[in-house]
Amino acid sequence: KNEVEQSPQNLTAQEGEFITINCSYSVGISALHWLQQHPGGGIVSLFMLSSGKKKHGRLIATINIQEKHSSLHITASHPRDSAVYICAVVGVRDSGGSNYKLTFGKGTLLTVNP
Amino acid sequence: KAGVTQTPRYLIKTRGQQVTLSCSPISGHRSVSWYQQTPGQGLQFLFEYFSETQRNKGNFPGRFSGRQFSNSRSEMNVSTLELGDSALYLCASSLAGPRGGNTIYFGEGSWLTVV
């Protein structure tokens, strides 16, 4: 079982719909990142969370540390939101020392149709 | 300010050869990390450097190595290339690393094809 699980793997929506992408993880974490990757490879960091909720424009990210779960919401989705959304976690400091390693989910391919 | 710059963007190598990829972080960023992305495995962590010191290494064979220079620029090297090393190699920089309150900034990546 992967340390980071995302759902759904693929999501198709109509323009204007409310989108939710989920991320569950099995390890203790110090931070969780939501990333966006467009075709061609470039990755953009959307949010970095260690607790609570963050909002940026139409994007909202939440995290529940106790339940080891995070969600990314897109309100009023638009075709330009079509991309792969990736959840990544940074584990807590382990007995071997510092942990600066990102562990990634497999990503969610979002397609928003006009 | 300039973003994270990776060179070369595209390259083709033959099995058995070695390759060096370069990453120039955002000015002022001291943490540089490297990732491999393949269709089958997704994104995987290779290593992370801060002030010329490797702080973490992923589960990759010793053929994969890296270093960071005093100006924070970083290189990664893959020796004795295998077909399975064909991938997008991404570099990311941040002020102090991907944990805590640090936003990470990715480069456009280097597409490596091994034939």
Image (cartoon, coloured by chain):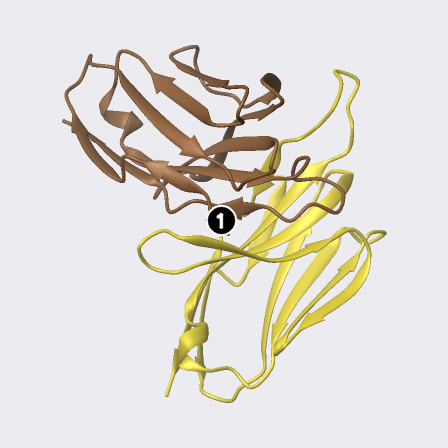
Chain colours: A yellow, B brown
| Image coords of residue A107 (percent x, y) | 49, 54
Residue lying at the far right in this picture: please name it.
Answer: A66
Image coordinates for residue B35, horizontal then vertical, percent: 46, 34
Q: Which residue is pictured at 63% across the width and 62% down the height? A: A22
Labels in figure, total: 1
Residue B21 versus residue A85: which sits nearer the camera?
B21
B66 up-or-down from B109: above or below: above
Q: Amino acid at mark 1?
A: Lys
Q: Chain of mark 1?
A: A
Q: Is residue A1 visible?
A: no
Q: Is residue B80 left or right of residue B76?
A: left
Occupied quadrant, residue A74: bottom right
Which residue in the structure is indicated by mark 1? A106
Residue B77, percent across and down?
36, 18
Q: Residue B22 is drawn in which quadrant?
A: top left
Q: Is A91 on the left-hand or right-hand side of A59? A: right
Q: Can you say whether A49 is above or below B63 in the image?
A: below
Answer left or right for A33 relative to B9: right
The relative height of residue A12 versus residue B95 in the rendered view (above or below) is below
Q: Residues within 10 Å of mark 1 (few under 14, many from 20)?
A: many
B36 or B91, which is in the foreground? B91
